[in-house]
Amino acid sequence: MYPKITLNLGGSLLVLESPVVMAVINVNSDSFYENSRFSEIDKMLEYAEKQISEGATFLDVGGMSSRPGAPISNAKEEEKKMIPVIKAIKKEFPTTFISIDTVHSTVANAAFQEGAVLVNDISAGTIDPEMFPFIAKAGIPYVLMHLKGVPQNMQNNTEYNQVELDVLDFLILKYQLLKQLGVKDIIIDPGFGFGKSISQNYTLLNNLSIFKILECPIMIGLSRKSMIYKIIDGSPADALHGTTALHFYALQQGALILRVHDVKPAMDTIKVWKALEMAKLEEK
């Protein structure tokens, strides 16, 4: 189904021969989907255990909301909030791959020291110029995402010549910079909802397969976003069915990592998609 792609995650080799799921855990009070937010470590650990039992390969832990209009967090405050969480997850679930969702290299470094094995940076190194050098020095895999502007103003800046090609050009440039620094493991995220209109998000999804040109795993973050719930005249709480539909389509376009709030529905979608792909192969 896919060519063999590997990630070196803290010395453990993950072979991505079929899609996997990344579960979202927000350690803040401001992320757009309430059920992913936690302020107490005990409740967060219960949630993490559920996500792992349902099949999550990664837990993506973030301390800063990146919803439209959200300000950039203070790095020291974010680190103070995040490190106890990383420590607790690592202690309770030592074999689980932990991703740190941050734009700050100091936070990423502190999390890396405590066992995080992946950095998920929504800003592609544009907010903190030390992020790329840190990634190269640490030898840690990196999620390279497209964002136009910053969360506080990104939805006021959605002008593109051709959204999918502009995003691809941005990612190619950043990819080349990372490779020049010696970064080996890069994951590509087109950045759905980050500086794009609803129609642009759907155009981007329709052309997701073009990002295969970079020969990197493609991660998508569509889960319960406004591009879904505004279409159905609902809220994030109403957007699971729409999320599942778009996850299936994204898998058909080449997505390898689904970043989600709901692990079991995403895992079920992957299983059904794989069955369909197997049937296609048997017909040949």
Image (tube, rainbow, N blue to C red):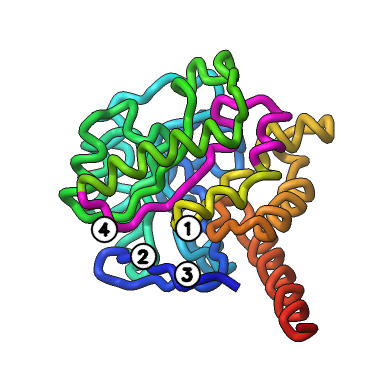
Farthest residue toward the bottom? 282
Q: Which residue is mark 3?
A: 16
Image position of 125 with respect to 253: above or below: above
Quadrant hosting residue 177: top left
Magenta residue check for 42: no
Alpha carbon separation for disc pair 4 and 2: 16 Å
Q: Amino acid under label 2?
A: Leu
Q: Amino acid under label 3?
A: Leu
Q: Residues within 10 Å of mark 3 (few under 14, many from 20)?
A: some
Q: Going 55% across and 70% down the picture, which residue do you hit?
A: 2
Q: N-terminal of the two: label 4 or label 2?
A: 2
The tag on residue 115 is 4
Q: Position of residue 86 (x, y in %)?
A: 32, 52
Q: Going 36% across and 38% down the picture, which residue do you hit?
A: 174
Alpha carbon separation for disc pair 1 and 2: 9 Å
Q: Going 76% across and 83% down the picture, which residue do you hit?
A: 284
Given contact means CB atoms under 8 Å apart, are the residues at marks 3 and 2 in contact?
yes
Alpha carbon separation for disc pair 4 and 1: 22 Å
> Which stretch is magenta?
182-204
**In this rendering, position of residue 143 left or right of residue 267:** left
Q: Amino acid under label 4?
A: Gly
Alpha carbon separation for disc pair 3 and 1: 8 Å
Quadrant hosting residue 173: top left
Mark 4 vs mark 2, foreground winner is 2
Q: Which residue is mark 1?
A: 217
Q: Which residue is mark 2?
A: 7
Given contact means CB atoms under 8 Å apart, are the residues at marks 3 and 1 in contact?
yes
Quadrant hosting residue 5: bottom left
Given contact means CB atoms under 8 Å apart, are the residues at marks 1 and 2 in contact?
yes
Q: N-terminal of the two: label 1 or label 2?
A: 2
